[in-house]
Amino acid sequence: MKSKITMLLVITLILSMLVGCQPAVKPAAPSADQPAASPGEKYTWRIAIAETEDSSSAYWHKEFAKNLHEMNPNINLEIFYSGQLGDITDCIEMCMNGQLEFVDAGPQNSANYVPEVAVFNLHFFWPNDEDVLNKVLLDSKPAFKAVSDLYAPKNLKLLAMHSLGFLQMTSNKPIRTLDDMKGMKFRVMQSPILMNTYSLYGANPTPIPYMETYSALQLGTVEAEENQASCILDMKFHEVQKYLTVTNHAIMPGFICINQGYFDKLPADIQKTVLDAIEKTQRWFVDEKIDPKMQGEKLEKIRNSGTGIEFLELDPTERVRFEEAAKGVVDFYIQEYGKEAGAALVDTLRAEIAKAQGK
């Protein structure tokens, strides 16, 4: 018995010595700046956008999804178009809370959470020039930083800004002059900026949800609305309107965001793939002139739709009158949206616009 016990002790001692000779290997702890990648891990992400599947925004996102997958076949981006995941304002909140990875948080829909970005709803603030828009929205570091700093406290990382076209006005009464706006029941989003703007034009601004606009126009609840050409065509607003005035009075920007906390936890190589795909998509969108082409095509389809809608344009004199009337909204914006922060954003954007114009 003693010999057996002695033998067991000897074996135990030998095994413990062998184990003690092995190096102490531990998985490397991922750093906060560069988490460890997991080879072969698959990523299925979702993004919500406000527009339909045949919009400029949809084309941008389809290209983004394609670029992501080509750069890393383990990444798949699922695009959810207007209303598929609920109201886009709710989707922005979902992304803020981490329930959704990506969202197109354009200023028209995110001003409830990031009030200062309502500056992008100002009329006649931007020059009627696509090249200038691209230089500011895509290439200006001061403009990008100023906007991204506003989204950051909401747990949203701004990835990209781009233009989705100028807005036009449709109506059941001709809009040729500023005086034509007097008393006109004009559909607007629930936006103090737009309410104030159309009041200064002499119109009667009426907030109506986007998806209820067609019936409101059809029933005469409102007489006019504003939108980019693709939205007018996709939502068939031209079927219940007699006139389209090419005003190019405002822009519709796309702001692509990802949940900041989620992005920070992604492996460094996946983060880089996201940023590289964003850059590639942005350049494609501009170089191929996707949005100007699409908006032009949509306007032609509206013109040739057989509905009898008449196209009008503002002459230079009337455009100046609209611009003068809209100037008062800048002071309203600064007073209502962030005071110093709003004023600083206005100054930054104006400086970048002037730089892009070569002034």
Image (cartoon, helix red, strand yellow):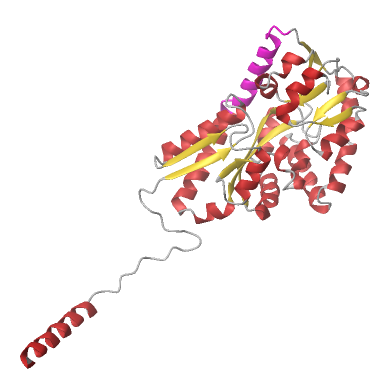
The residues colored magenta run 287-307
Residue at image point 77% right, 30% down: 250
Q: Is residue 200 left or right of residue 86?
A: right
Residue 290 on the magenta span = yes
Instruction: Quadrant for the C terminus, please.
Output: top right
162 in relation to 220, above or below: below
Q: Position of residue 24 (x, y in %)?
A: 30, 74
Residue at image point 86% right, 15% down: 173
Residue in front for this viewpoint, 332 or 99: 99
Residue at image point 64% right, 23% down: 292
Residue 136 can be seen, yes or no: yes
Instruction: Quadrant for the N terminus, please.
Output: bottom left
Residue 297 on the magenta span = yes
Residue with the most extreme bottom position:
2
Residue 167 can be seen, yes or no: no
* Secondary structure mostly seen in the magenta stretch: helix
